[in-house]
Amino acid sequence: MKTLIKNPMAQKRLLRFKALRRAYVSFWVLFILYALSLGSEIICNSSPLYVRFEGRSYFPIFQFYPEDVFTGSGRQTRPDYHRVDRSAAFSRNDGNYMIFPPFPYGPFRSVDPDSITVSDVVSLVFEPMPQVGTVNITSDFIIRRAYRLDAFTGFPDRDAKGRDLSEWVAIPQEIRAAVAERFSNRPAAAIARSITMPDGRRFTVSLSTYEPRGKQPKSIRLTFRSMDEKKRASSAGTYRVDLDRQLKRTRNHENGQPDLWLELSEAKRAELLDMAANRRYGPVDNAVTRIGKRRYTVEFQKQDVRFPFPPVKGHPLGIDRAGRDVLARILYGMRTSMTFGLLLVVGSMVLGIAAGALQGYYGGRVDITGQRLIEIWSALPFLYIMILMGSIYGRSFGLLLICYGLFNWIGISYYIRAEFLRLRRQPFVEAARCMGVGPFKIIFKHILPNGMIPVITFFPFSLVGAIGSLAALDYLGFGLPPPTPSWGELLFQAQQYRWAWWLILYPSLALFVVMLLGVFVGEGVRNAYDPKQFTRLE
């Protein structure tokens, strides 16, 4: 490359750019990634590269063929080549075959859920239901009625009536005082206190808010709630049972704890197995069962193919909400982002250079008028204009490029104007005027080549900004129309499905890498054009 550049100053700048190793490597990495994205159809495509059918050759990647050509169905629509490849009409001849790209999924094709292999294991997850009991007591704490108090005292509810609650539970003094207030028919606020039993069990006893009534109450209700459900659940046994396709257990209970599955009755186990068998064909409601003195909810869990779907074999980066492969959409999205950025920056540079050159060269009223018009134009709300234009003409790549380009040129025009104001009084410009050279030739042949440093140094940073802006607009829903592959659109899906980590990680990583490489390249270009490196006094 150095031999192709004859200008000594340009050669020095190229050497300085290469000296910053990360900038030079980033340039080639970014160039290779963009080149690969330009050939996305050869890498990721649901259409085959080559089809051999009945002794004839077809190239679907370059030419459209209706479905009737391969199936004889009379349909003139685009064929589903994956389905055609598996059809009996195509496979009856051993000479028929298709050669697909290395990754046989395009950015618009929805994956067939039946093609995704998932585990057949059905898991029965036992979750202990919260233990809540109530007891109605008299003023001297004699039990009049109990409901599920056995979970806290260990005695059946039917044996509790007429007994003193203090025999089983050490009632806190605050609760006793609150009970006395209620029996005195005085207003009282809600109160709750914790109780620790001799065996280490902990629960709370509470009273609700009380308002005075026409006559004193005959009984007051206390509510008991367990405080350590997780601890009690872990000590009760195994709460997960995995069943294979034959409904046989594939996972034993852990930590030597009692096996809840064996504590179930035969009838209850048969009922749960029947529900687990139905879970293979669709969701089923949770079941409720009682084991010993505790009640459990049984949830039937199985991995289902629901979009978005995490990475699996054949789809290393996962699948989005519409069943489309994330890898294909990221690759095609890079081509869209880079192409949009390059076209936007080049177009903005052309407009900015033209506006800044005219203002800087002529100065005076042209400069003042141009600056005022630019200030008015820059005050227009870009996002509102995008919404208005999109609602009138519909979202499209060209409309987005034009609307964004009409505002993106303002920044570079300021730098070009400043360069022309500085250079127009230089001797070589005065000499050109004296020789009768026209203004157009002076602007673009004499001044502009000497004022291109801001354009060159800002180009990589402007490209990074354009890529980020496109992703932001797509994320907000004002960018490219669906189903155009876009990184911002994938991030918007990630906001809707926050559990789908692959929709967050991979598009963000692609955007981060491309923008980081662009910043490194811009840093190298700025370092190469730094004038201090060539004006240092020795």
Image (tube, grey):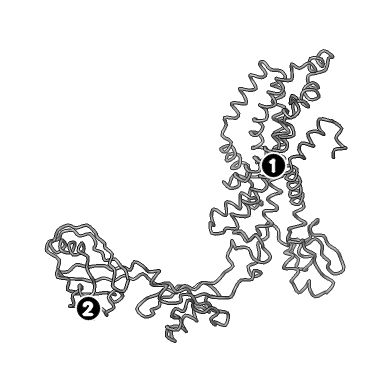
Q: As shown in the figure, which amino acid type bears the numbered disc 1? A: Phe
Residue 106 visible in rendering = yes
Q: Which residue: 60% across, 56% down? A: 503
Question: Which of 28/321 is in front?
Answer: 28
From this view, report whether residue 127 is shown above or below residue 421.
below
Q: Quadrant of residue 138?
A: bottom left
Farthest residue to the bottom: give it: 266
Residue 399 seen in the figure: no
How crowded pointer 2 is (Cα within 10 Å; few <14, some 14-19, many 20+) is rated as: many
| Measured Cα–Cα span from mark 2 to mark 1 | 78 Å
- Residue plotted at (26% across, 64% down): 206
Quadrant including the C terminus: top right
Q: Report the number of numbered marks.
A: 2
Q: Position of residue 478 (x, y in %)?
A: 59, 44
Neighbor class of circle 1 (other Cα within 10 Å; few <14, some 14-19, many 20+) is many
Mark 2 or mark 1, earlier in chain: 2
Residue 44 rendering spot, x and y as whole percentages: 73, 58
Q: Can you tell which mark lies on residue 520?
A: 1
The secondary structure type at the circle numbered 2 is loop
Residue lying farthest to the front in this orientation: 538
Q: Which residue is mark 2?
A: 160
The circle drawn on residue 437 is none
Q: Nearer the viewer, mark 2 or mark 1?
A: 1
